[in-house]
Amino acid sequence: MKNTDTTTLTKPLRKKVDFNDYLSSFTKKYGTYGVVGAAVVGVIVPVLFSSILMGKKKGKKRGVPVKVGGEAGYTVRNARNPELVQFPWEGATTIAALFEQCCEKYSRNPCLGTRKVIKKDFVASSDERKFEKVHLGDYEWQTYGQVYKRACHFASGLVNFGHNVDTHVAIFSETRAEWQIAFQGCLRQNVTVVTVYASLGEDALIHSLNETQVSTLICESKQLKTLAAIRTRLKTVTNIIYFEDDENVNISDLFGSTSGWNVSSFNEIESRGERAPVAPCLPSKDGVAVIMYTSGSTGLSKGVMITHGNIVALAAAVMTIIQGLGRNDVYLAYLPLAHVLELAAESVMLSAGCAIGYGSPLTLTDASSKIMKGTKGDASVLKPTLMAAVPAILDRVRDGVLKKIDDMGGLAKKLFYFAYKRRLQAIEGSWFGAWGLEKWFWDVIVFEKVRSALGGRIRIMLSGGAPLSGNSQHFINICMGAPVCQGYGLTETCAGTAFTEWDDTSVGRVGPPVPSCYIKLVNWAEGGYTTSDKPMPRGEIVIGGYSVTSGYFNNPEKTAEVYKVDERGMRWFYTGDIGQFHTDGCLEIIDRKKDIVKLQHGEYISLGKVEAALLSSHFVDNLMVHADPFHSYCVALIVPSQEVLEKWAKEAGIEYKDFPELCDKAETVTEVQKSLSKVAKDVKLNKFEVPAKINLMAEAWTPESGLVTAALKIKREQLKTRFKDELQKMYH
Ligand SMILES: *[C@@H]1O[C@H](CO)[C@@H](O)[C@H](O)[C@H]1NC(C)=O
Ligand SMILES: *[C@@H]1O[C@H](CO)[C@@H](O)[C@H](O)[C@H]1NC(C)=O
Ligand SMILES: *[C@@H]1O[C@H](CO)[C@@H](O)[C@H](O)[C@H]1NC(C)=O
Ligand SMILES: *[C@@H]1O[C@H](CO)[C@@H](O)[C@H](O)[C@H]1NC(C)=O
């Protein structure tokens, strides 16, 4: 027998290469002709094919019309499932049952991963402020089996600690593994969990805990001080459980012995439970699992009651949508778990046996602000395959990458933009170009570097919370080489109601309804939107099905206003958003009822539409357009991009003392306004839609200031109140 050299049969592993190294080694190996040849194969051939195949992309039906009960309208369901799905599989009717079954099924698979702090440091910036920097270690994993045990121990410990199971528990903490464990523990004792944003103000916290009569509050040790200070206003609370991470906290120092509160660490509760197990008391399908306080854009926050049935239906639906979701997937969790998007996403991941690695927005990448120089961010250590993001974060990623490319300049910059343009044409044009050889070519020589910022393995990026601009969607899609699946949903509909399918490369749409609900459009005559509109039916978006929650806690009036039950017993939620259905059954959000104002001369102006359009000016970081019925024009408050503005000022030779002064200068205002007019013209806004006056605000709007939501959506009412004078000035 012949002796074969096996080494020649195994392919060498592809190494990460720098473009210049790549090019020179390639030239050395294959000569200049080789390079030209590769270019011909890589670029020109696909160009030819693209032209041939252009326009032949099949109009795949993703959603189809369906007959339903309730108010008349145009209703669409997911094309693949004639019947709405309610459970992932038989017997998984509650989150608790689903979790138990998954933990058994995947018991040896990694479930939750966390990074330990190796070193902590404070670095002073130029303006004397101190910034915390951390050096974090590798992910340490617990299996599904281990996590299940911990949740059971916590459930028993909670009862042993004296929590009255007929009262509520609240979790007030940033996203972390213990959050999920505590959550699952509570549900095993049929205890409803109240969630509150960690960044929500004090008054909102006190309001929500009092309204839901919370007796046990779970928090992080760094919040104990704040809680001690407002102790007398938290009348219903008797027990505090804190996640132990700061050894310096001294409980008796903080609370004394006379506080009337029983305080215990999370670990103590777990050990209590382990020592004295208590039988579980499993919930039922229609039981309320979570009362989630939404950081609504207006007024006091409202508690949305999300049932077990809502969440399991959503998990069942999303599992059918994400291709091949399973144990090989790694999900990077860093958005607030008090937001329905993250809670829903993690619930889906757990149902499918994925590994969840926890991180935070400030430690996400190597370049994140809290990461110690020279150490690794969450994404580069975890190398996730799935991530969720809100548009504001994706916009930042895009700006960051573009800035780096611009700084590099020269050939690298030219090449990047050329490659980007080719990919964009391919995505918009042809199937072949989108997935073919040319894609591989550009990926290897240009985009692999960009991709490594998020670990290099992302296969699907989920986006939700607010509409994502087409620009950002394309950018992430091309640079990450992964589809961006945009979702549409509200807390009231338990997140996902529509979801872009992974092979849909169009932008600006949110996909067909998920298989757990129907989406109906109903006429809104006042705003001029009807289901008989051409070329597409338009109207207010109404959601029906298993993901529709059971209403607002302790607020039957408000619940009756926006939730309806039809003659067949199906629940419908009136979103107040305006949408239209494309012929393939995909939904596009085009407006919001509340944001439409009738101007003095009778024209309707959609503030949201104008804002979305003007955001694409590179001077604008955020803005609010304002209009009132007593005037014929609109005005805008604008948070300009400090970096772009200062760069412009330098080039234009404008002198200024500090940024606020630069914002006040007439030249600056004129320049920004010019840019807005240009953008408005490009997207064909009407004249009355272009702000006649603007005010540049030097200070950014943050969730902490209460001016934007945690997803960085503007809060119109709060902004209007805070900047009443500025707005009035622009009208006089
Ligand atoms: C669970 O709690 C709900 C009230 O929140 C109650 O109606 C239901 O009967 C409880 N289930 C069990 C099994 O005790
Ligand atoms: C707490 O709730 C009760 C009613 O349940 C109400 O009377 C009281 O004013 C509330 N207190 C605060 C501080 O919100
Ligand atoms: C906590 O503070 C109390 C009173 O100030 C003190 O007696 C006790 O030793 C402290 N405990 C620890 C662990 O530092
Ligand atoms: C604290 O716990 C002890 C027993 O663990 C109990 O006797 C006491 O009533 C509790 N205090 C409060 C305020 O719940």
Image: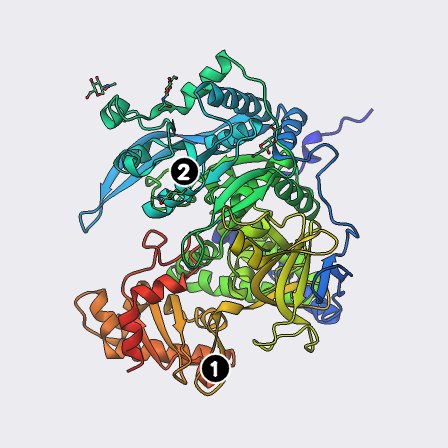
Q: Which residue is mark 1?
A: 681
Task: Report if residue 712 is visible in the image.
Answer: yes
Please provide percent x and percent y for residue 183: 51, 32
- Residue 13 at x, y = what percent? 60, 38
Q: Mark 1 belongs to which amino acid?
A: Lys
Nearest the viewer among 122 and 286 is 286
Q: Quadrant of residue 212?
A: top left
User: Marks 2 and 1, Cα distance to the nearest angstrom?
Assistant: 46 Å
Farthest residue, direction bottom? 601
Q: Position of residue 618 (x, y in %)?
A: 40, 69
Residue at left offset 26%, top offset 21% = 257
In this rendering, the answer to whether 271 lies above or below 409 is above
Q: Which amino acid type is marked by label 2?
A: Phe
Name of the residue lying farthest toward the right:
1
**Quadrant (top left/top right/bottom left/bottom right) for the C terminus:** bottom left
| Figure quadrant, ligand 4 | top left
Q: Is mark 2 within 8 Å of ligand 2?
A: no
* Residue 172 numbered tag: 2
Where 652 falls versus 640 (above or below)?
Answer: below
